[in-house]
Image (cartoon, rainbow, N blue to C red):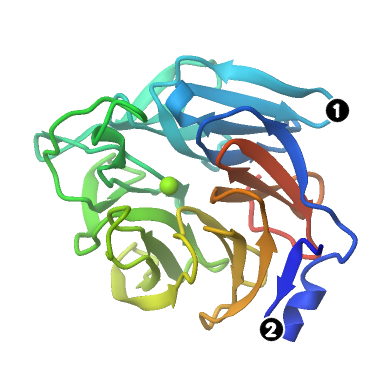
Amino acid sequence: MSFFQIIDPIFQSYVLFNAPVKQLATGFDWTEGPVWFGDANCLLFSDIPNNRILRWTPGSGLSTYREPSNFTNGHTRDRQGRLISCEHGTRRVTRTELDGSITVIADSFQGKRLNSPNDVVVKSDGSIWFTDPHYGIGSDYEGHKSEQELPCNLYRVDPATGAIEVKVDDANCPNGLAFSPDEAKLYVADTGRMFTDDPKHMRVFDCSDDGDLSGGAVFHVVDTGASDGFRVDTDGNIWTSAGDGVHCIAPDGHLMGKILTPEIVSNVCFGGRGKHQLFITGTTSLYAVALNRRGVQWP
Ligand code: MG
């Protein structure tokens, strides 16, 4: 059995025919939020229902990075190398400083508590962009069951003032997000309410240097599952989670191929030396596959 499904012939050159999809670790309940730390040669990721952040290191494997984690979900790094995390349990976005202390970046908007920040990216100007669907407050499984106070928005945090502003207010449940390599486009997944006919698609916005968004048309409709999380490679292709593995979407929105996995995938990130390893958080396991593409991954 091949690990790859070629839909557009060009996808053959994006993958390595003899590179396996390896299971690096297993025994989790729902993993998300992989983020690569090249300086520490390790990957961090969330095991949300078990309220912990785990660390995987080539050669020495799995260890615990933080437990309890306040039910963290998505992570990224800012340009100073600091960990930025979405926390369901405390309904906030935080930064872990280099000395280990935690700084709250956002926990409310106009006096109302955020829902459960899900995924986050940092633009090169230092602005922090995050989505705030309600998945983490609907039950006690991935956070704490509690009342929703705000619509499910996408927010931007200003790098100079720390002010929080709504950037997308017409999504059902905004989830994964990523900028194109030149940051002129922002891709945002809408994963809707599970077990419903809510659209499961990805939208694309034009993003000005000042962070103004326009457009927002549907860019791609996922054929299986949902685009919970995704990353772009240096050519602008989008590697997104889906119900049957990872899908590779061209900049024009068409599906080029799939990396097939035995479990539903939640998120991906590039890492490893050369930034050509794609780390994949599946339902109960962490996987990785070497690609013939390099990710936009800082640092
Ligand atoms: Mg997500």
- What's under tag 1, amino acid-wise? Gly
Q: Position of residue 20 (x, y in %)?
A: 83, 53
- In the image, is the residue at mark 1 within 8 Å of ligand 1 by its beta carbon? no
- Labels 1 and 2: the sequence-earlier one: 2
- Label for residue 8? 2
Q: Mark 1–mark 2 contact, CB under 8 Å?
A: no
Residue at the spot 11% in from the left edge and 39% down from the top edge: 149
Residue at the spot 26% in from the left edge and 31% down from the top edge: 139
Q: Which residue is disc 1 drawn over?
A: 59
- Label for residue 127? none
Q: Is residue 150 visible?
A: yes
Q: Position of residue 296 (x, y in %)?
A: 64, 58
Q: Is residue 126 visible?
A: no
Helix, strand or loop at mark 2: loop
Q: Residues within 10 Å of mark 2 (few under 14, many from 20)?
A: few
State the quadrant of the N terminus.
bottom right
Report how many numbered discs are placed on residues in the image.
Answer: 2
Relative to residue 245, is residue 214 depicted above or below?
below
Q: Residues within 10 Å of mark 1 (few under 14, many from 20)?
A: few
Residue at the spot 46% in from the left edge and 35% down from the top edge: 84
Question: Who is closer to the viewer here, 121 or 217?
Answer: 217
- What's under tag 2, amino acid-wise? Asp
Helix, strand or loop at mark 1: loop
Relative to residue 157, is residue 81 depicted above or below?
above
Relative to residue 64, is residue 172 depicted above or below?
below
Q: Position of residue 184 (x, y in %)?
A: 46, 71
Q: CA distance from mark 1 to mark 2?
A: 35 Å
